[in-house]
Image (cartoon, rainbow, N blue to C red):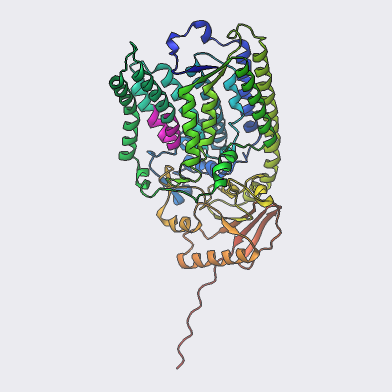
Amino acid sequence: MRIIQSQPSLANQPSAQQSPGALWWCLLVLALIAVVVPIAAVRYLPLNDYPFHLARIFILADIDGPIVSRFYEAGNWLLPNIALDAVGLAIAQLTGPELAVRIFVALALVLQLIGVVALHKAAHGRWGLWPLLALVPVYNGILSYGFLNYLFGTGLALLAAAAWLAYRERTWALPFAFVAGCILMLCHMEAFGVFAVIVGMAEIVRAWTRGLGGQAGRPEWLPALARLAVAALPFLAALVLFLVLSPTSDDLEGGFRYGGFRIADLIYGPIFALASSLPMLDVLALLLAGLLFCWAWWSGRLSISVPVLLGACVLAAAAVLLPRYMLGSDFANVRLAPAAILVGLAAIDVRPAIVMARPWDRLAVALAIVIAGLAISRSVGMTMVWSKWERQINPIVEDLAVLPEGVMVFKALHGPLPVLMPNSTMARAAWKPSVKHVASYAAVDQARFVPAVYIDPHKQPVKVTAAFQPVKALQGHNPFELATPADLAALVEMLQGFQRDNGDQGVPDRYISIVGSAGPFTWLAPAGTILVRRSARHLLLRLEPPAPPEAPNAERR
């Protein structure tokens, strides 16, 4: 096994090793197609947060419209969570909001795959087959949650880290790191963290190596530490700029907390963050990759980049040890588990006997067969699963489509919320598919106000107008949780009381969308509501206007 202490410069690589062969290109194209096909095959992606992401792009695309402008107004764009809003809105000018968001999701996955390939090239100085295995972990639990800004930013972070490792001796390296850091913070703060960790580990290893030996075999700690401090400057400058300009910095105080310490969370949290909707294929991919790794090690063809591997280890440790809640984001720690795996893949190289000169080298053939098999099987499997789940989502969307423009739609959920570690049959059913936010599709295609659409002025460049902020505060970001019909009756009474106390605000028609998170339910419309539509997992009710408050009895003479 060969250990690489520092990354080779691309400028010094032989041209023969910079051009991958036909086999590599064929497998790369196959991997990219496999990643994109499930997204192209379904219209409503069964991702937990996808409905409100899509709804928000529709809102931003029509922010000055006569109906939307009553409910929403433009906010600040200097925020660390706006990759989808910025890129999706730009694409929407050409394609429309719905296709734009699907393109964005595809880009998020493609960027991660290409980012691993580029980081591997920067680390090992050659194009290898091994990083194409990244097509497996890009479909993971974090994607199932719909944390799209973070995933998109992670792909860009891998590309930025690859560029730094390859060209850090160039005069433009420091300005590039600053600009890349600013862009990544706008995508997602943890994407900036991924970039900083990879570069930081590479620079620390280089400083340590030069400090011990130097150019002439003598310790050179002072120049090595000075160079390390200079490399840190663009990252510190980007952070300072964020603290000065972004309103999100107001959330820093008290924005970090643990969700309780449990050994099970430390062990299983990262595992569920990495798991896809095809657990058997996940296990098979792990076994095959493990066998190939052992074979490469036994045959002496394994190469490890220490700086990149250290970056993967730091990210893995952070996925376990960081707080669960940071700056208003849940599952902030376990989001890093997929990034740790992707960086770990880039740290490994399995070298054929002669680099791409013998395409029928047994190890290269084995890798190619595994990559092709996993690409085809995962693409077909994910497409089948997502198509099945879309058939459960379609009736709910069709129910919501009958609503007129300008109405208000409250969200409610019957059954368990989807959680990162489902520990019961009902909890697992809540992920097949997750319909927690499906009612947000009411804000798609037609201008309707869904208070639960995720709108946080510290994270999105849009905010609810002052007139409707009380309604937003009442609903929050999540659906009302209903366990029994009595809970629904109490919700109706509460909403009518709220309307009676606050007036109809010019929106007299108000609806409640109740979705069964774990399967069908058969509740009846309670008093104070009118049944609008019913499907197996959905109940759409119209709220009747609240009765006026009873006048006090006239004083008897």
Relative side of 327 to 378, left or right: left
Q: For residue 311: magenta?
A: no
Position of the C terminus by quadrant: bottom left
For image coordinates 53% across by 23% down, the residue present is 346
Q: Position of residue 134 (x, y in %)?
A: 58, 26
Position of the N terminus by quadrant: top right
Q: Nearer the viewer, residue 314 or 157?
A: 314
Q: For residue 184: magenta?
A: yes
Say whether residue 88 is visible. no
Residue stretch rendered in magenta on the structure? 180-195
Say whether residue 236 is visible. yes
For image coordinates 36% across by 22% down, the residue present is 207
Q: Does residue 457 lie above or below 113 as drawn?
A: below
For image coordinates 54% across by 34% down, the residue present is 338
Q: Does residue 260 lie above or below 144 as drawn?
A: below
Q: Nearer the viewer, residue 436 or 1?
A: 1
Relative side of 194 to 338, left or right: left
Q: Position of residue 435 (x, y in %)?
A: 62, 48
What is the number of callouts on the image? Answer: 0
Q: Nearer the viewer, residue 31 or 141?
A: 141
Q: Position of residue 25 (x, y in %)?
A: 60, 15
User: Residue lying farthest bottom?
Assistant: 557
Q: Position of residue 334 (x, y in %)?
A: 52, 40
Magenta stretch: dominant secondary structure: helix
Q: Does residue 227 lie above or below 84 as drawn?
A: above
Relative side of 391 to 319, left or right: right
